[in-house]
Image: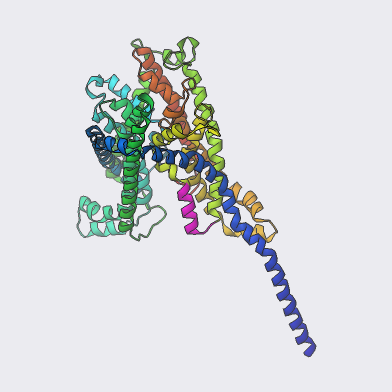
Amino acid sequence: MATRHAGERTGGNAGAGTGRRRGRVRGPRARRARIAPVALAALPAAFIGVFFLYPLVGVLVRSFDAGVLLATWRNPVTTDVLWFTTWQALASTGLCLVAALPTAAVLARLRFRGRRLVHALLVVPFVLPTVVVAAAFLSLMDRFGLADRFHHTVWAILAAHVFFNYAIIARSVAAYWSQLDPAPEQAAAVLGASPLRVFGAVTLPRLAPAVGAVTAIVFLFNFTSFGVILILGGPRRATLDTEIWRFAVQRLEFDTAAALALLQLLCVLLLVVGATLWQRRRQVAERLRTDTARRVRGAADRVLLAGTLGVASAVVGLPLAMLVERSLRSGGTYTLENYRRLGESSERLQALFVSPLAAIRHSLEFAATATVIATIGGLLVAVAVSGRRKRGAAALEGAFLMPLGTSAVILGFGMLLVLDSPPLDLRLSWWLVPIAHALIGMPFVIRSVTPALAAVSPRLREAAATLGARPARVKREVDLPLALRGLAVGAGFAFAVSLGEFGATAFVVRPERPTVPIAIFRLLGRPGEAAFGQAMAMSVILLVMAAAAVLLIDRLRPAGAADF
């Protein structure tokens, strides 16, 4: 007995000693595990700091000239510009809600053949370049003889904004709505409430968090709209973004442009803070389910589905169809002449400096480079975020998503201001365009990869660790292969965004290396049917590339990946 107890005591002490030794071994590993996420985020943090925060600070510093600042803000023209910027954003957002909520209801409550394809096609306008959207509406007005009546009017701007943001509301609200338990609506209907009253008294209050969040996003997009306002609104319909561009690029009055940029940043900050506070107050606990949509049954459902899809086709499809039709028309007949001219060296127009085909090549080169940068940076951030606690992860992810909430015009203007002296003398460099595009594309990679990494089962990581794999190897051989689909989705979004980016590019692109959106804008500014036809043809090429990217993204999208 004594021998046995002694052996037990000895074994216990030995175990304790082993535990202490293991603790000493695990200590450095634990510290490395805590440091690893920070180290992973260091490179993209430096990238964001140098090419986003530094230009932003440059804009703020340039705007701190009290005389110019007060003179600019007190100018009645600035007041009129601010009022129009706000008014058109409010009107555009309201029209978007009216047009998109019925589509969201059908997508959320009815399951039908081709539902996923409809989801994918609806997002095409969102990834289209703003210059293509403007070109589509110009072709629509040209086809029906409405150019003299609607070009350079607020109605053209409102219609283009509805087209551009329709999918954001329809898809975002439908995704939330489809997870709501239909029991409260069914109970209200049983008690005799009309469908309209059920929607207003029961459904709409439950949708308030989703509708409020997407409304704030759409208002922000409309408030910072640039390409649509510049082309469809013209000089008479100026917003803060278009005025910043005119003062910085056309008039070279950087101090005034900086004062307007500060005003826009303050407005956006007030919007974001107000929307966040409102959403917190309106946030309610809802029991969400996987998918509550039911199959189409009966004539009423078929009529509702046909009517909704018809409206969606008119809102989204008609401008794009007119764009394609106009690109095929030259000299009063239908021909491929506009496309053939894109590759001719004789079509090296003075406004472009290069042939239109060369502009397409430049866009592809910039997009490929920007996608590589955004994918690497976004992957490092996503891995770093997945290795931290909830609060730390949210703060880290939010810091890297800042470029998504900042106007591309201000980003391009900031780069133009500060990146002009060694060691960051990049104003004449080829790299500045893909760097600006990567800043805008990186948040899409982060939002696509982070949910994919969060969905990895902890048991797989524990099993790999039990077999002796170090944390770095676990991430490389377990997390990364399972997150590849999310990474492909993020890379696709980054590529599509780069192809169509116009706001920042308008400031930093070199005249001899225009991108497709810049070339379209320059061609639309030249008189003559040939230039207009080439602009339409280039817009269709960009449309096809964007649509292909969206369909590929939707096919690769893993469960839980962010929509936008």
Image quarter of residue 137: top left
* Residue 171 included in the magenta stretch of the image: no
Residue 89 in the image: state x and y as whole percent. 28, 38
| Number of numbered markers | 0
- Residue that extends furthest to the bottom in the rendered view of this protein: 1
From the top left corner, tell me how far across and down residue 520 is, in percent.
Answer: 40, 22
Q: Residue furthest right?
A: 3
Residue at image position (47%, 40%) is 54
Q: How is the image coloured?
A: rainbow
Q: Range of the magenta residues?
A: 388-399
**Observer-nearest of 172 and 148:** 148
- Occupied quadrant, residue 236: top left
In-front residue for pair 79/305: 79
Q: Position of residue 234 (x, y in %)?
A: 29, 25
Outermost residue, front direction? Answer: 67
Residue drawn at 52 percent across, 27 percent down: 364
Task: Residue 318: tell me if it is visible.
Answer: no
Residue 397 forms part of the magenta stretch: yes
Q: Is residue 229 visible?
A: yes
Q: Nearer the viewer, residue 558 or 426?
A: 426
Of residues 495 and 119, the one nearer the viewer is 495
Looking at the image, which residue is at 29% across and 19% down? 142
- Residue 65 appears left or right of 380: left
Q: Main secondary structure of the magenta part?
A: helix
